[in-house]
Image: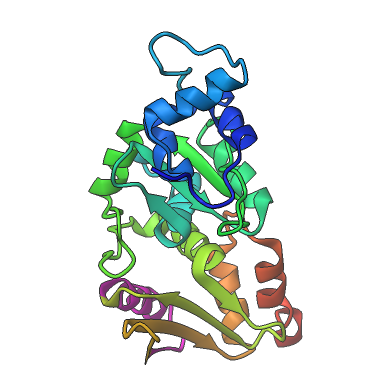
Amino acid sequence: MPRNPGITDEMIIKLYKEGVSYKEMLPIVGLSDRAIRNVLHKHGVKVKSSGQPRKHKVNEDFFKMWTQEMAWVLGLFVTDGTIHSNTHSISLTQKDERILRLVATCMEADYVLAPAAPTRSTPTLIINSKEIKQDLKKLGITPNKSLTIPFPNVPNEFLPSFMRGVVDGDGWVQKTGYVMNITTGSKHFAEGLGDVFKKWNLNTETTLTISQTEKTIYRVWIKGKYELPKLAEIIYANAGDHYVIYKRERMIQHAFKNE
């Protein structure tokens, strides 16, 4: 079994020392348990007899109860998260590493990043927990979710924070602050987004395109220099510092001009 492109011995050692088990390393590095152990032995790394390093710290009850932080993180996982099918790992990818650190803090999780590789240069936070994976499944987030994910049943009180997480994940905000859209491959999720925007009395529309791989891509739009500040007023109300900074700045730039 060949290792994944760009994975070095040093990366494997780093993952092991950070507490990633052999099974959890497999989809990341592409090697079997035995091959990983051989790498560790070759470099004189002391291996525990059980073959399992320490378990990462994480609040395994995080997704069991709705809070503003939980709703925001859920929105991020819906858009930028990956649920690994053959391990008890979940991961979150974000260009803004500040967001990953905030998520780790919210979840009381060790800050463990997947090693960079030629095919993956964007920072990716790894969290290992069977319990959290099961809780996310109950919320509709499963492996290979991108085309089928439903819109979660989010209580109204926490919808703004959830939608902020979705915008932080798959939202695009025009530099001039006149246009915002959210991209998804799931028709059901797109319909849910549209319903929320309509409930908030925002002018919205949904368009679709066909990708080169013949998959349908849905884009849910908010347009207008008056509409984006209205959206921002809703989703950033309980935000604290939990948001992608440049997206908020673009969204609110016309706010004072509208008064």
What residue do we see at 59% from left, 41% from top? Answer: 113
Would you say 97 lies left or right of 130 here?
right
- Is residue 241 visible in the rendered image? The answer is no
Residue 82, position as x, y percentages in the image: 40, 53
Q: Which residues lie in the magenta part?
A: 188-208
What residue is shown at x 53% (from left), y 31% (from top)?
Answer: 108
Work out whether residue 151 or residue 124 is closer to the camera in this orientation and state it.
124
Q: Residue furthest top?
A: 49
Q: Which corner quadrant holds the C terminus?
A: bottom right
Residue 248 lies, with reference to residue 253, above or below; the image says above
Relative placement, left or right, of 64 versus 174 is left
Q: Is residue 199 magenta?
A: yes
Residue 42: horizontal and vertical position, in percent? 58, 21
Residue 140 visible in the snapshot: yes
Asked if residue 227 lies in the magenta stretch, the reply is: no
In the displayed structure, would residue 56 be above or below residue 65?
above
Using the rendered view, name the quadrant where residue 52 is placed.
top left
Camera-side residue: 65 or 6? Answer: 6
Query: Image quadrant of residue 17?
Result: top right
Which of these two is toward me, 40 or 217?
A: 40
* Residue 256 position (above or below residue 166): below
